[in-house]
Image (tube, rainbow, N blue to C red):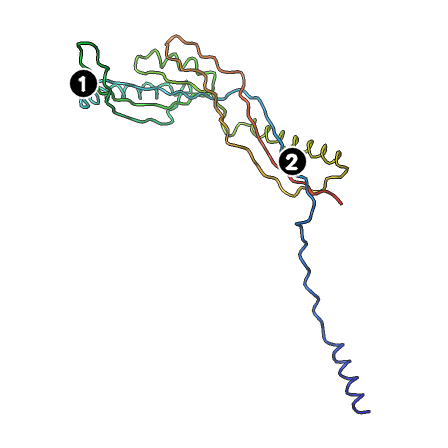
Amino acid sequence: MRHALAAAAALVALAMVDVAPAPAQPVDRSNVATLTVNGQGRVDVPPDHARLSVEVVTAGANPEAATSAHRERASRATTRLRDMKNDGVSIEQSSFSLGEFRNPERPNTPGRSEYRAVTTFELKIAPAENADKAVTAIAGSGLFEVRNLRFGVDERNPGFDAARRNAVENARRRALTYAEAAGVKLGEIVSINDTDARHPRESVLMSPMARNVQVIAPEALTLTASVTIAWRIAP
């Protein structure tokens, strides 16, 4: 009888012990069915600026002669460009180079070398409508050789956001079409990835070497965006 009472007490004590609940198991999402779609968006917007590359070139029989004469011309060119600030012209960067160029030999005439000092200016013109006036003034100054002109769109242009919205809407329409065709319904969005490739945001218009060239800005540039969205397929 004593052994039976001891066994019963042990069972009661065991029943009174708090048993910690088992930790919740993480949900395995590897088997969740999803639908992943890529969407494309595009918007046409007018250019908001132009970029112009110009050079000041000075030749000389030797490096000292070329650089000595070039220093004064480059200084005048810099002043001329800074005076055009009110016309929307700004100097983004400049660089200097000095190189030797050998003229080709001709019959009975030996080839001859000359040295050229070159200062290159990268200019921004904003708004884009000022490009014609600016190019005409720069080319007519007699100081610069105009290399090329490009029209572009700044990164903060609202057209980029519009293209991204269009890309999302395009992905949504495609996803709904696929889901309907497959006889399923879309659930919540699992992931959104911006897959926008780094595309050119400028359009090379011309190389206006002549001084009397009229610059006409393009009516619009195309901005694009790309997005990849994954939806969970509703059970």
SS of the residue under disc 1: loop
| 193 is higher (above) or lower (below) than 148 | below
Q: Where is residue 154 in the image (x, y as percent from the top left)?
A: 49, 27
Looking at the figure, which quarter contains the N terminus? bottom right
In the rendered structure, the answer to whether residue 121 lies left or right of residue 112 reads right
For the residue pair 68 and 227, the one nearer the viewer reads as: 227
> Which comes sooner in the sequence, label 1 or label 2?
2
Q: Which of marks 1 and 2 is in front?
A: 2
The residue sitting at 43% across, 9% down in the picture is 214
Q: Position of residue 4 (x, y in %)?
A: 80, 88
SS of the residue under disc 2: strand
Which residue lies under the disc numbered 1? 61
In the rendered structure, the answer to whether residue 103 lies left or right of residue 235 reads left
In the rendered structure, the answer to whether residue 104 lies left or right of residue 126 reads left
Point out which mark residue 37 bears: 2
Mark 1 and mark 2 residues within 8 Å of each other at the beta carbon: no
| 235 is higher (above) or lower (below) than 80 | below
